[in-house]
Image: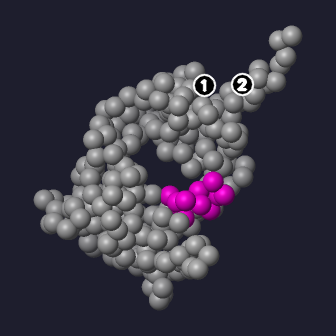
Amino acid sequence: MTKVKVRAGKGAVTQAQEGGDYGDPPPVGLYHLELKGLDQKTAKGANGGKYLSCRWQPIAAGREGEPLDKKLGSVWDVVSFSEDSEWARARFALALGAQPNRAGNVDLDVELDATKPGSPIGTVVLGRVKADKDLEGNYKPAIGWIGPLNAPTEDSEEFADDEEEVGEEVDEEEATEDFGEEDELLTEDILADYNNKELAALLTEFDLDKAALTVKVKGKVNVDKTRTKMIAAILEAQGADEEDDDEDPF
């Protein structure tokens, strides 16, 4: 009989012993979030930009940190190293306690090994969860804002809306307003940082059929292949629009 070795690292063992990540998706709102996971990954695609994958666990509710009624699932966030995502890196660094220098810049050395000194794993921040959608249109929690626990309340409200509804459809006029006035062209790297709702808004802007771009394998949506197909269609549509703009009707 063929044997296989089942192996798991210390972090995975601890997570399994603690009951894993299982819990209801956290509703929209303000939470104390603990950084439970941090990995550096490479985006799929031709450019393959690097990013940090962060797993935040809600451990208390509201600014004052009221006890949760029940265990809530984790919320994932991405911190990209692309030029267009400098704001996300600043937000991440400030939330973890970094302070701007005299020039106004912020630098943070992040230790990815949770067993070594300097690892941010276990850091608790104030964070606002916003509503997003998965590719099937179901509610998916996402990070709207993070900051230090002593951040002013207005800061957390500036980047996320408590009244956002899970079932809200993307408005075509709003999508055009958000994405149709960009001065520079969208690139594959930039689109890789967009969440599913933002990609859906772009599909609306370019009059692309979301259903036709959804890839299913054995009846289930393949998220990676669907995102790749959507991004390729958006880039192609953007190029076509640029060619039309360059044509002189006279």
Along the line of sight, the residue nearer the viewer: 216 or 191: 191
Task: Name which residue lies at 27% across and 41% down.
Answer: 163
Classify residue 248 by image quadrant: top right
Marks 2 and 1 close (CB-CB < 8 Å):
yes
Q: Position of residue 193 (x, y in %)?
A: 56, 50
Residue 88, magenta (yes or no): yes
Question: Which residues are drawn in magenta?
Answer: 78-89
Q: Report the Cα–Cα distance between label 2 and label 1.
A: 9 Å
Q: Residue at label 1?
A: 206
Q: Position of residue 59 (x, y in %)?
A: 24, 67
Along the line of sight, the residue nearer the viewer: 147 or 12: 147
Query: For residue 241, which numbered disc appears in the image?
Result: 2
Side (left or right) of 170 relative to 69: right
Residue 64 appears in the picture as rendered? yes
Residue 15 appears in the picture as rendered? no
Q: Position of residue 75 (x, y in %)?
A: 36, 57
Mark 1: amino acid:
Phe
Mark 2: amino acid:
Asp
In the rendered image, the quadrant that contains the C terminus is: top right
Along the line of sight, the residue nearer the viewer: 60 or 44: 60
How many tags in the picture?
2
Lower sequence index among marks 2 and 1: 1
Along the line of sight, the residue nearer the viewer: 220 or 24: 24
Task: Name which residue lies at 36% across and 77% down.
Answer: 122
Density class for disc 2 (Cα within 10 Å; few <14, some 14-19, many ≥20) is few
Side (left or right) of 228 relative to 148: right
Query: For residue 31, which numbered disc appears in the image?
Result: none
Classify residue 236 by image quadrant: top right
Q: Position of residue 173 (x, y in %)?
A: 48, 24
Instruction: Find numbered disc 1 in the image and state the secondary structure of the residue it sits on.
Output: loop
